[in-house]
Image: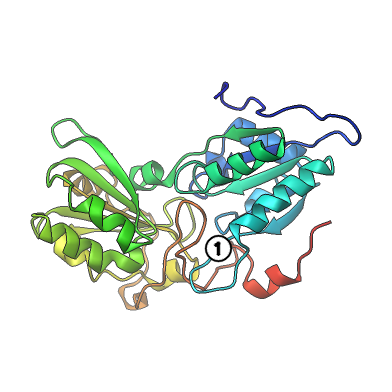
């Protein structure tokens, strides 16, 4: 692959000049954590195809662009990946500069590779603009370094969306020396805990749950692995459809030391109730159905939109 950010693909062969597709990582949710190049491409964009992690604050970075929601939510009607690929190709062939804005990093559980392959096969010029992955940012913002000398020399990032995919990997995971980070795993947290316990993990292994780390729905829980199976999100995190990151390993205990009291504004205990499905790096395959004012539009508003 060429240098990060360089255009990949052939030039136009004549007629209407081909547009450009930028696969842009939106980071964990805070616009201030976008890269400089991501902000530049948004300012230049004619069309932004965005997912469930994009907030209204990001729209200010692309005031002249049309915005079209293509996010995915568990159990709800959503646009297929094949349709998204066709939209990227069609709009670029019309000469438009298109930004595909994806939560976290486009190549970390975000289907960015599938979109890049579709663009290659169609002969569309594109570029990859990395983003801050929530696999690293969410624990970090909550005071949890996913590697730490003497505690963890590496980490494993998994999608918790499908048990048939993550179970075989967890069954070979060492019980110490490695940090486990699970995205899109809130809905399967009990099964993840049970699989780890069967693998030999102690019930007292430090664990953490970080919700909406870089959003208004930020919340953190830390405790023993056994208790992770029944942790429930507070109401404010549910209403914000906050993406959830699970962390298992000795480093999880550092959260209360490095970031005591994080986040600064904590919900009242009586607000806690059964949690919603979480969002993942790709912006919402496992999210809950509620969305706060700062989140993505609801499904009805999505259906009413049309591309130019």
- Dot 1, crowdedness within 10 Å: few (<14), some or many (≥20)? many
Query: Does residue 218 appear to the left or right of 81 in the view shown?
Result: left
Q: Quadrant of the C terminus?
A: bottom right
| Residue at image point 73% right, 45% down | 89
Residue 63, visible in the rendered structure = no
Give the farthest residue toward the right.
Answer: 15
SS for callout 1: loop
Q: Position of residue 171 (x, y in %)?
A: 18, 53
Indicate the position of residue 40 as horizontal and vertical percent values: 69, 34
Label 1 belongs to which residue?
Answer: 72
Does residue 3 appear anywhere in the picture? yes
Coloration of the structure image? rainbow
Say which quarter of the image contains residue 272.
bottom left
- Relative side of 231 to 81, left or right: left
| Position of residue 269 measured from the top left corner of the image (x, y, whole percent) | 31, 73
Left or right, residue 180 beside residue 300: left
Foreground: 10 or 175? Answer: 10
Q: Is residue 211 above or below residue 98?
A: below
How many numbered discs? 1
Where is residue 168 shown, x and y percent of the image? 24, 54
Picture quarter with the N terminus: top right
Residue under the point 65% across and 46% down = 100
Residue drawn where x is 17% and y is 65% of the image: 194
Q: Residue furthest top?
A: 3
- The structure residue drawn at horizontal position 64% and vertical position 24%, both measured from the top left corner, is 6
């Amino acid at each position: 692959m060429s240098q990060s950010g360089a255009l990949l693909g052939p030039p136009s062969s004549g007629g209407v000049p081909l547009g450009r597709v930028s696969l842009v990582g939106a980071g964990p949710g805070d616009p201030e954590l976008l890269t400089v190049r991501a902000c530049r491409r948004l300012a230049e964009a004619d069309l932004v195809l965005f997912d469930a992690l994009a907030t209204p604050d990001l729209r200010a970075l692309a005031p002249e662009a049309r915005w079209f929601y293509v996010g995915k939510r568990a159990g709800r009607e959503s646009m297929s990946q094949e349709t998204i690929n066709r939209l990227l190709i069609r709009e670029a062939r019309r000469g438009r500069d298109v930004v595909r804005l994806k939560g976290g990093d486009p190549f970390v559980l975000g289907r960015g590779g599938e979109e890049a392959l579709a663009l290659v096969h169609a002969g569309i010029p594109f570029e990859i603009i990395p983003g801050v992955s929530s696999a690293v940012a969410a624990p970090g913002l909550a005071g949890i370094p996913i590697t730490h000398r003497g505690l963890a020399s590496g980490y494993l990032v998994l999608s918790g969306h499908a048990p048939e995919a993550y179970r075989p990997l967890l069954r070979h995971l060492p019980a110490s020396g490695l940090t486990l980070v699970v995205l899109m795993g809130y809905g399967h947290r009990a099964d993840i805990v049970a699989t780890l316990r069967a693998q030999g993990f102690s019930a007292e292994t430090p664990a953490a749950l970080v919700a909406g780390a870089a959003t208004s729905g930020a919340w953190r829980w830390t405790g023993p692995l056994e208790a992770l199976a029944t942790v429930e999100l507070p109401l404010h995190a549910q209403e914000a459809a906050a993406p959830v990151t699970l962390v298992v390993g000795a480093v999880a205990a550092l959260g209360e030391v490095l970031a005591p009291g994080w986040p600064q504004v904590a919900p009242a205990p009586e607000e806690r109730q059964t949690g919603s499905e979480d969002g993942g790096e790709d912006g919402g395959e496992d999210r809950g159905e509620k969305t706060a004012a700062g989140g993505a539009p609801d499904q009805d508003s999505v259906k009413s939109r049309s591309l130019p």
